[in-house]
Image (spheres, rainbow, N blue to C red):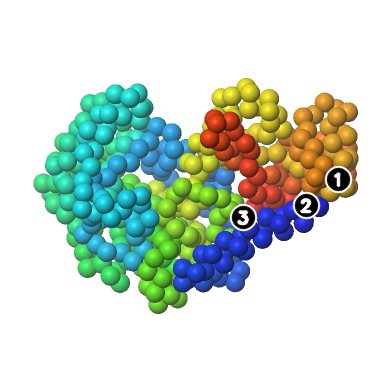
Amino acid sequence: MNLEEHVRMLGEAEEDFELAMGKHGVPFEEAESSPRPKRELVARRCACHCENGGSSIWRNWISPACLACRTGEGTGSLFVDLRCTKSCYFCFNANQPHCEHFRSHERDIVLELEQAHAAGASYRCLAVTGGEPLLHKERVAAFFKRAVDLYPGVHTRLYTNGDLLDERVIADLAESGLVEIRFSVKPRDFDSCQEHAFAMMEKAVAALPDVVVEVPVIPGTLDEMKALLRRAAAIGVRGVNLLEFCFPLTNAEEFCARGLKLRKQPYRFLYDYWYNGGVPVARSECEALELVEFAAAENLEMGIHYCSADNRNSAQVNLQNKPFAASPGLQAAYPWMGRSGDDPFLKCAKAFGDDAAAVRDWAADTGVPCDFNPTVPSAAIPCTCAPAAREACPSAVLGESSNVLEEQPDGSFCMREVGVRELADQGSEKN
């Protein structure tokens, strides 16, 4: 099996995934509308940061909570219940564990925070989400006050659609120690309260350190989104988070009525991700990147952050791979593996088929760590050694293998390969 055949084998799993997801009622696009390399191209054109393995693009400012979210370390989000003042067709709360229970039952988030602190949990960022958290105004304010007491200097944030905000509530939140309020602005086609949300943004800008707008980029709403960016900038918000829009596997008729389809190659690498937001929608990323370019062309001073579905999955990958950096035993077991920059996946270079033996022999002669699998056959070496391997074996075609550590029931670990791409010059990735 050569590299091309190995990639094709992994591609068959993606085809099976598409067939399974198609049963939920929304079809996939024929060809990917926004190939991932476009992210870096747009970032370069706009002088933006392109980070977290290329999954996060931002300019001017990004919330500290967004940076923490990438790794999943030192950050936590709680909700009182999942009741809400709206009924968005794209809401993914139905995918939350015990969703129905928490539509009618409440959690004591202050007690849960105190229990976490007593157990030794450390937080740099804490949030309250929902549902709509301000259905429980007093409990939310109490949570933030207690968070500041238990974790001095903690970054606190609140997610809200703004329906239940008024000047008194904003003042109470400011007094409680809230740092960042995130307004989840909904499209005009089914939100009659958008003007109220904008009015409350103006009040919040005067009272709180950071006001952020967080909005999914729904294909076909580009003009509305540009107007939203201009208006948010005029109000003085600190930043706008543009979210890749996802299909939560429910309300397929709403998505189909709007002509929406699912994104071809929805994930950078197919895997069993924890994030339950759904499957990315075609053209959402394409229009989000256009909005990033628009913000740069308009010279909007507020922060603009494109948060892809890949970005939201990165915390899981980082947490699963974190033991590798801390364990000499794992490093000794997989000496050909390593991290590359801020990419959360563990990587190695691989030769396949007839090239594998040549790379294996070169590695043995030079003392380079190598994992030879005669069944495939394949030979894995550190990505940093790929240029030397190419020089010694000029006809060899090398791939970049991306991997995730998986903990087994007995506490041991195994390495799971989730994707292979042809390795470009100097070990850079072809997405």
- For label 2, the residue is 3
Q: Which residue: 30% across, 64% down?
A: 88
Helix, strand or loop for disc 1: helix
Badge 3 vs badge 2, beta-carbon distance below 8 Å? no
Helix, strand or loop for disc 3: helix
**Of discs 3 and 2, which sits in the foreground?**
2
Residue farthest left in this picture: 168
Looking at the picture, does residue 156 appear above or below residue 253?
Answer: above
- For label 3, the residue is 37
Which disc is residue 355 wearing? Answer: 1
Q: Marks 3/2: CA distance?
A: 21 Å
Nearest to the observer: residue 87 or residue 230: 87
Label 2, residues with CA under 10 Å away: few <14, some 14-19, many ≥20: many
Mark 1: amino acid? Asp
Residue farthest front in this picture: 410
Q: Marks 1/3: CA distance?
A: 28 Å
Question: Which of marks 2 and 3 precedes in the sequence?
Answer: 2
Q: In this view, does 86 lie to the left or right of 301?
A: left
Q: Marks 2/1: CA distance?
A: 9 Å
Q: Which residue: 48% across, 60% down?
A: 279
Badge 2 vs badge 1, beta-carbon distance below 8 Å? yes
